[in-house]
Image (cartoon, rainbow, N blue to C red):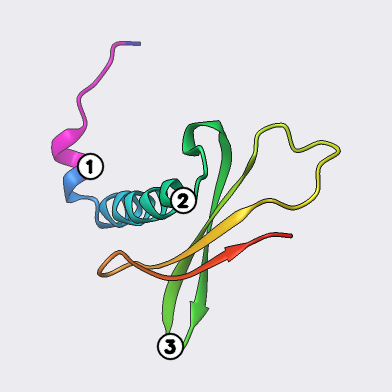
């Protein structure tokens, strides 16, 4: 299968652009909090709060078996890409 350039299509995809904005804001916040983003297992969840959607990006250790806590969760407002809340697991 040949590689395909999707730049133009991706930039027209509102959800893809929104997720990129969310990830950039969350990654910056996580890095500033001392999290090695590239060594994290990352999950993202969308939920409804105050009549609007919010995205939560969770950064956990890749080697999570036998470990407890230490996750960092960053809640991001999708339209402006602003960080609403930062939670650190115990």
Front disc: 3 or 1? 3
* Left or right: 25 in relation to 71: left
Q: Residue 30 carries which label?
A: 2
Residue at the image point whose x is 22% and y is 42% from the top: 10
Q: Mark 1 points at which residue?
A: 10
Q: How crowded is mark 2: few (under 14 residues within 10 Å), some or many (20 or more)?
A: many
Range drawn in magenta: 2-10
Q: In this view, does 46 lie above or below 48?
A: above
Nearest to N terminus: mark 2 or mark 1: 1
- Residue 89 at x, y percent in the picture: 68, 59
| Res 51 label | 3
As for residue 20 lying within the magenta part, the answer is no
Real-space Cα distance between discs 3 and 1?
27 Å
**Residue drawn at the location 21% of the way across and 31% of the way down:** 6
Q: Answer left or right for 39 relative to 76.
A: right
Q: Do the residues labelled 2 and 1 touch (CB within 8 Å)?
A: no
Distance between mark 3 and mark 2 Cα atoms: 26 Å
| Foreground: disc 2 or disc 1 | 2
């Amino acid at each position: 299968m040949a590689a395909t350039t999707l730049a133009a299509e991706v930039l027209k995809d509102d959800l893809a652009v929104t997720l990129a904005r969310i990830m950039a804001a969350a990654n910056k916040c996580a890095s500033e909090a001392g999290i090695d983003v590239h060594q994290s297992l990352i999950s993202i969840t969308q939920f409804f709060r105050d009549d609007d959607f919010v995205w939560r990006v969770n950064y956990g250790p890749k080697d999570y078996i036998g470990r407890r806590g230490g996750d960092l969760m960053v809640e991001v407002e999708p339209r402006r890409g602003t960080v609403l809340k930062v939670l650190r697991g115990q």
